[in-house]
DNA sequence: CTTGACCTTCCAGTTTAGGGGAAGGTGCAC
DNA sequence: GTGCACCTTCCCCTAAACTGGAAGGTCAAG
């Protein structure tokens, strides 16, 4: 009842993306209209919106696919979702910590460069600020 | 006087990486020994260490290549380095801000899931926590 | 004379989430 | 009958920084 472009637009995606998701197993293989066009329902839009929320939370398509597989197997995936969110939280904390440490390193180098002793700009070496 | 493996080891890299850097223009095309082996000097190790410091600061190979090109043209690249470091700082701040915002979103979803009203684990829907 | 550790080149693949575009079918309006 | 928007499959491309592996050359030791 819904063609691919309409469905994609309803979920804020492109037709290309829907075919890609089908390919990756995030969407079940679509039914076809007599003319060969993929045929979707409202449920697909819900599913796409779920995928989009997952992406917004920084989950990978593989992780989202895992959630959907649990749900497609007939189980409530909430426990699984909770675990994924917990892992995502700790991953984010680790990433933030890493970037913060990197920022401190870079800030130190930058401060040295900004305090710029021109003598240190020595053609004999590459750059003493780095 | 130094073969590729030795040079790579001295800089904490692999021979593959040195060939790759040569290919990308970060290392000048190497001299060759009579048998066709690449031949490096101490200077190469210094250059590789400079590249490594740049990577440690989160600079891309392209940015580092830019610094080296300035220096190879006979100029002191310190001003250029200072600019790159400033840009890197603001990029890092933006990234950290983005990840921090994402963390807040995920934490919210996770808290809702942890406070877990089991009724919300409804087979009719995908998962109300996401 | 062969083993083994080096070295050479070149080609291909890794990861993520799609995008670009060709060649061709469908279906409605003018 | 033709223009137009839409759909189909197919294959290649992107960024980043390498890594793996195949096929073959070099050289010192045993």
Image (cartoon, coloured by chain):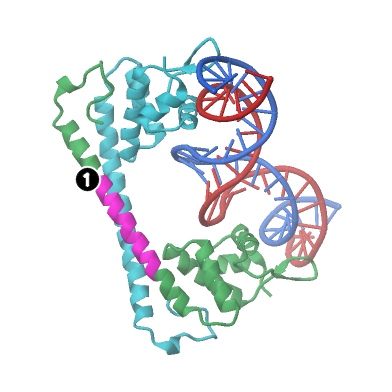
Chain colours: A green, B cyan, C red, D blue
Q: Looking at this view, is B35 or C13 the one in front? A: B35
Magenta span of residues: A86-104
Q: Residue A46 vs residue B115: left or right?
A: right
The image position of residue C23, as x and y in percent, is: 79, 45
How many numbered dots are placed on residues in this image? 1
Q: Residue A113 vs residue A63: left or right?
A: left
Q: Quadrant of residue A7?
A: bottom right
Q: Residue A120 vs residue A53: left or right?
A: left
Residue B130 visible at all: no
For the C terminus of chain B, which image quadrant?
A: bottom left
* Relative vertical location of residue B70 with respect to residue A65 in this rendering, above or below: above
Q: Is residue A89 magenta?
A: yes
Residue at the image point whose x is 48% and y is 28% from the top? B24
* Relative vertical location of residue B66 with respect to residue B96 in this rendering, above or below: above
SS for callout 1:
helix
The image position of residue B96, as x and y in percent, is: 30, 54
Residue at the image point whose x is 60% and y is 73% from the top? A44
The image position of residue C18, as x and y in percent, is: 56, 55
Residue A48 visible at all: yes
Residue at the image point whose x is 33% and y is 51% from the top? B95
The image position of residue B21, as x and y in percent, is: 45, 28
Q: Is residue B65 magenta?
A: no
Q: Looking at this view, is A33 or B17 the one in front? A: B17
Query: Mark 1 packing: few (<14 Cα in 10 Å), some, or many (20+)?
Result: few
* Residue underneath mark 1: A104
């Amino acid at each position: 009842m819904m063609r691919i472009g309409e469905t994609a637009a309803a979920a804020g995606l492109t037709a290309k993306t829907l075919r890609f998701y089908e390919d990756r197993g995030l969407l079940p293989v679509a039914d076809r209209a007599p003319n060969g066009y993929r045929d979707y329902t409202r449920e697909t839009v819900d599913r796409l919106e779920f995928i989009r929320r997952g992406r917004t939370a920084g989950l990978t398509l593989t992780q989202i696919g895992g959630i959907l597989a649990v749900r497609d197997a007939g189980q409530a995936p909430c426990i699984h979702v909770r675990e994924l969110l917990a892992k995502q939280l700790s991953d984010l904390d680790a990433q933030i910590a890493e970037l913060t440490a990197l920022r401190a390193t870079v800030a130190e180098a930058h401060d040295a460069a900004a305090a710029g002793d021109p003598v240190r700009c020595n053609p004999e070496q590459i750059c003493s600020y780095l």
